[in-house]
């Protein structure tokens, strides 16, 4: 059994209220924790911004055994440009399909028993219209690549993921660290991968002592290291160590020490309230409207 775990995908969001509605009311996820920061993250968790920002973790259950979403909100930035890098997140939940219909959230058929829902910001979510399982409903994250064999080598040979499926017709490869975890699907788009300004980041954990090994492999193989091993502080919570990489198509990858991350990621029963209070206190939309201005587009 692999000691590495798939943890979350980072989405930049420009409209926190609409985004919360999508994840809570449409998908049926819970707010696991919410944190506010006065300055940018040392590992660029919130992107290339150094101002005030917030992080909200949402998912179907505890981060110990569920793949979740990290929603990063940069105060003053209202919109990000999508690229073609993030192809979608697939989850199984007939409840989410019925929620979308009840709330009038647009759905389009994407195959037999599969519906496409678009999150605020344009991110694609594929909903399998089947009963939500008792374990994690999130099945896979799909990313675009420009050279499938090259990317498969990177993720399998250098990072240790197992190749679970190959589909020559669709030009896809499905990988994972374990069968009971969210999988990573790579799809060859036959061209350049554009990350826009909305680019995300996929995160995994590993035993703390493996972080230096991962960094050493990347140095030996002349691969990109965006942030060498660094400690990140969250006020009142555990300090974690991370190393940030970029694959051959510049998809950002975070590896974090598992032991400290399990302490950091304990579900906060006040998460819902903290998010709601932060949104109520955020008067930036009113300020921009009053001054006849628009929030920045990144």
Image: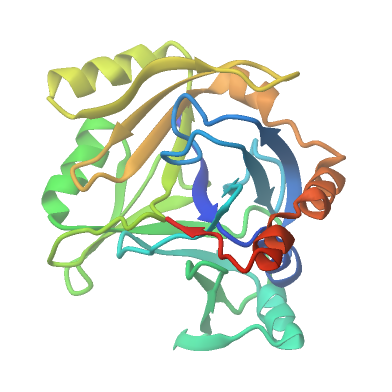
Taking the image as shown, residue 132 lies to the left or right of residue 111, namely right
Which residue corresponds to the image point at 69% horizontal and 61% vertical from the top-left? Answer: 285
Give the residue furthest to the front: 291
- Residue 137, given in percent of the width and then of the height, sits at 61, 60
The correct choice, above or below, for 262 with respect to 165 in the image is above
- Residue 118, given in percent of the width and then of the height, sits at 53, 74
Taking the image as shown, residue 167 lies to the left or right of residue 242, namely left
Q: Report the coloring of the rendering.
A: rainbow
Q: Quadrant of residue 21?
A: bottom right
Quadrant location of the C terminus in the rendered image: bottom left
Q: Nearer the viewer, residue 248 or 226?
A: 226
Taking the image as shown, residue 286 lies to the left or right of residue 170, namely right
Q: Nearer the viewer, residue 133 or 200?
A: 200
Q: Quadrant of residue 153?
A: top left
Q: Quadrant of residue 143?
A: bottom left
Q: Nearer the viewer, residue 186 or 160?
A: 186
The correct choice, above or below, for 131 with respect to 140 in the image is below
The correct choice, above or below, for 125 with respect to 202 in the image is below
Callout count: 0
- Residue 159, given in percent of the width and then of the height, sits at 29, 32
Residue 49: tell me if it is visible: yes
Which residue corresponds to the image point at 70% horizontal and 36% vertical from the top-left? Answer: 36
Residue 3: tell me if it is visible: no
Taking the image as shown, residue 192 lies to the left or right of residue 3, namely left
Which residue corresponds to the image point at 17% horizontal and 68% vertical from the top-left? Answer: 168
- Residue 73, given in percent of the width and then of the height, sits at 59, 49
């Amino acid at each position: 059994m692999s000691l590495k775990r798939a943890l979350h995908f980072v989405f930049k969001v420009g409209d926190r209220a609409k985004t919360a509605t999508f994840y809570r009311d449409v998908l049926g996820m819970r707010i696991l924790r919410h944190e506010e920061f006065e300055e940018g993250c040392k590992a660029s968790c919130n992107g290339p911004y150094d101002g005030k920002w917030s992080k909200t973790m949402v998912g179907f259950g505890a981060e110990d055994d569920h793949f979740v979403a990290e929603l990063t909100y940069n105060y003053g930035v209202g919109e990000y440009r999508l690229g073609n890098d993030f192809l979608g997140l697939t989850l199984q939940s007939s409840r989410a399909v019925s929620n979308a219909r009840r709330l009038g959230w647009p759905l389009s058929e994407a195959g037999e028993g599969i519906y496409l829902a678009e999150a605020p910001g344009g991110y694609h979510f594929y909903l399998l219209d089947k009963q939500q399982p008792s374990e994690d409903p999130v099945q896979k994250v799909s990313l675009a690549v420009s050279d499938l064999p090259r990317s498969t080598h990177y993720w399998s040979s250098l990072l240790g993921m197992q190749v679970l499926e190959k589909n020559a017709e669709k030009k896809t490869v499905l990988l994972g660290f374990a069968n009971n975890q969210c999988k990573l699907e790579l799809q060859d788009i036959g061209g350049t991968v554009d990350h826009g300004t909305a680019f995300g980041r996929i995160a995994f954990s590993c035993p703390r002592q493996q972080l230096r090994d991962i960094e050493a492999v990347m140095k030996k193989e002349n691969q990109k290291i965006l942030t060498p091993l660094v400690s990140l502080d969250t006020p009142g919570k555990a300090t974690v160590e991370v190393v940030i990489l970029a694959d051959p198509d510049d998809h950002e990858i975070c590896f974090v020490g598992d032991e400290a991350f399990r302490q950091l990621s304990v579900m906060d029963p006040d998460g819902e309230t903290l998010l709601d209070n932060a949104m109520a206190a955020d008067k930036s939309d009113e300020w921009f409207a009053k001054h006849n201005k628009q929030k920045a587009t990144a």
